[in-house]
Image (cartoon, rainbow, N blue to C red):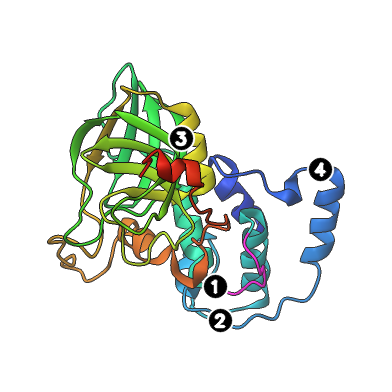
Amino acid sequence: MKSPITSAIVLLAGTAVLASPLMSSPAAASSGTAARDQACTAPSGPYQWQLEKKLKLAEDGVQSTEDCIAIRDLQRTLGIKPADGRADLKTYRTLLVHEVRKNPNAQGKCPVRSYRVTCVDLNRQILWVQKSKRVIFAPVPIRSGKDGYETRTGWHKIYLKHERHFSTLYNNAPMPYSQFFDGGQAFHGTKNDLFKSGSHGCVNMYESDAKRLFELLDIGDRVYVWGTKPGTGDRAMPSNGVLPDDVLIAQGFGADGIAEDPSVASDPLPNELEAGLG
């Protein structure tokens, strides 16, 4: 029978997560083993039951030393800081997002085509790119339009790209790596919390993710948007009263500052303002 620690690693083995620092070298692995032997004293957390279930631990909702060590090991594997073994929202939401990365189109909501399609799932607030059935840009968290400014659904096409763009509507707000796909709505990076409120229709993402997407896509590439951002439109509570994982991902991933982009906002240069790139 697998130990909780082994189960945590196996759970992530097939996902498209960044390589854990603990698993990158024999020395790191040795260091990780030593670290796991240290005392783990974190109390029970608000997501104790959920993480016990995910890690195949005894489901009693009460933190044990075994639980604490397994959760702490999972946090280190996911790159979560602090890795203290507490079953908090940050750990659970990050795990949910990484689980989605295994097969983002399992529900078949994004059309499969022979060409590149950027898939924007407003329900789960994630974006990925696929070509045929192959994912060529792994899912990343996004922030779409808030109530009254919803990101428009359906088929779109990239028609304009600006690496350093500034909004003419919102006080020259920086919109790095902008790629416009429908009537002023664009993919672009942001330094703000991805899940606090919402955008004015654009699809926001970490600036590093926006840069990678900018480098991948070309003018004319197709975009498909579907679903409803949690908190907008008419999305009823399920009859069993339990929110599904996709809603939990969207509502919780940005809490506690974990979706804050560490990049520094840069003001437009004088020549960019003169050129009217806004």
Magenta span includes 155: no
Q: Which mark is residue 44?
A: 2
Residue at image coords 31%, 36%: 180
Instruction: Give the residue number, with chain letter if any, for mark 3.
Output: 213
Verify CB contact (< 8 Å) between mark 3 and mark 2: no
Instruction: Give the residue number, with chain letter if any, for mark 4.
Output: 25
Residue reaching furthest left?
Answer: 234
Q: Which residues are magenta?
A: 80-86
Q: Which quadrant of the figure contains the N terminus?
A: bottom right
| Secondary element at tag 4 | loop
Verify CB contact (< 8 Å) between mark 1 and mark 2: yes
**Label 2 neighbourhood size at 10 Å, few (<14), some (14-19), many (20+)?**
some
| Secondary element at tag 1 | loop
- The earlier-in-sequence mark between 4 and 3 is 4
Kindly identify the amino acid type of the residue bearing the numbered disc 4: Ser
| Secondary element at tag 2 | loop
Kindly identify the amino acid type of the residue bearing the numbered disc 2: Ser
Kindly identify the amino acid type of the residue bearing the numbered disc 3: Leu
Residue at image coords 51%, 68%: 257
- The earlier-in-sequence mark between 3 and 1 is 1
- The earlier-in-sequence mark between 3 and 2 is 2
Residue reaching furthest top?
Answer: 114
In the rendered image, which quarter is residue 119 located in?
A: top left
In the rendered view, tell whether residue 240 sits above or below residue 183. Answer: below
